[in-house]
Amino acid sequence: MPNRHDFPAGFRWGVSTAAYQIEGAVEEDGRGPSVWDVFAARPGAVLDGQSGRVACDHYHRYPEDIALMKDLGLDGYRFSIAWPRIQPDGTGPANSVGLAFYDRLVDALLAAGITPMPTLFHWDLPQGLEDRGGWLDRDTAYRFAEYAELVVDRLGDRVPAWITLNEPFVHMVYGYALGIHAPGRALMLDALPVAHHQLLGHGLAAAVLRERGREVLIANNLTPVWPASSSEADQAAAVAYDALHNRLFTDPLLLGRYPDLSAYGVGEDLGGSVRSGDLKLIAGPGLDGLGVNYYNPTRIAAPTDPGLPFAEAEIEGVPRTAFGWPVVPDGLRELLVGLQRRYGAALPPITITENGCSVTDEPGPDGAILDQPRIDFLSGHLDALAAATTQGVDVRGYYTWSLIDNFEWAQGFEQRFGLVHVDFTTQRRTPKSSYAWYRQVIEAHRARHAG
């Protein structure tokens, strides 16, 4: 049965994707190489040597994908713009052919009655900028603002709200600290300047968007942090982890300051990265909305490695996704209520910009794809989201991850998150049972508010 909890009449229903995960066409129409093109070519970097070279071929098949969105009855579509399509080397004038693709995409979405919500950066930095230091280099923040200006000047007349960055925490940790994502650097705590430079890039790009009257959001991956026990050591470790994962990328935006990172041996200047005026620029006039990507809580124990002030611990006794992630729907309610308590009046309206799960789902003998675990996952999280609204959290929309199965970064094509199955050999799209369920949820919501 569709979720029966009510949301406000103006609540927006959507889906999310990312350019490198679905577009393909990595060498067409003047697109330059991204860090993910280079990283995926490294032996052993991605499962089975796979890459986003073709991915879902959305670059050519976007009309088919928009037809699927229209059939779902979506209000909005969150996608990302591939920076290397706009500036192949990360600098200089716009590649007009690359911009033209997003022109066509935006116009087609609007014709289908779907509001586009672009993300300017979803991890696919032009390799030319990475060769000059990437997000470790302060200059990349200024290049990001120039890129943002090129894009919003072309599309801004039709696109009201923009997301600057997607999950800067994950990009910093997986890409620069651990090296398991592009660009593949393993710097551990020396990666912290990446946090500040991404946030500085957000602030600079936000100023460009504001000058043009556009709304500004950021999409942060946030997690409830659970101490492994009531011991003082586990409690302190949980506080340290929360500061890194959640507060490092939210406090500067909403409070104008960095959290206490002394557990990492770092002061308020993040090792000399912060300059006078930076935090004022990052906070700016505030966000129009906070995008929250939620997948699971994190359980934290006292450190076992002397290099970090925490250690991750297993969450036991709960279901798991095909990815092995714990399924804890009420964690979403806990997270949102916690944000409200922490930031109070400084917290802007929230949009759930990603929430979903990987399921091992393949067509059955009759061709149907029954992904009941995904339906259970989404239904439980919508219950939790509705519960958060009853506790006073201002939530404006829900965008599930993802519309279609896609390239799941270092996991290649093994993990399937889509409402629509993709045969990566034929590119055939087949809606799963969760697709029909989500459509019913949206229809039921509209029926409750009709008239």
Image (spheres, rainbow, N blue to C red):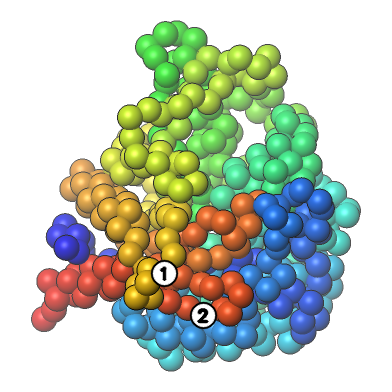
Q: Is residue 139 above or below residue 438?
A: above
Q: Residues within 10 Å of mark 2 (few under 14, many from 20)?
A: few
Q: What amino acid is at disc 1?
A: Pro
Q: Nearer the viewer, residue 309 or 343?
A: 309
Q: CA distance from mark 1 to mark 2?
A: 12 Å
Query: Does the residue at mark 1 contact the one at mark 2 (Cβ under 8 Å)?
Result: no
Residue 363 numbered tag: 1
Q: Nearer the viewer, residue 6 or 8?
A: 6
Residue 187 numbered tag: none
From the image, tell me which residue sits under label 2: 428
The reply, left or right, for residue 432 in relation to residue 267 is left
Q: Quadrant of residue 20 in the image?
A: bottom right
* Quarter placement of the C terminus: bottom left
Q: Is residue 315 above or below residue 358?
A: above
- Residue at position x 22%, y 51% in the image: 383
Q: What amino acid is at disc 2?
A: Arg
* Quarter placement of the N terminus: bottom left
Q: Residues within 10 Å of mark 1 (few under 14, many from 20)?
A: some
- Residue at position x 45%, y 41% in the image: 325
- Residue at position x 34%, y 61% in the image: 371
Place of residue 231 in the rendered image (x, y in percent of width and height, measured from the top left): 42, 8
- Local secondary structure at mark 1: loop
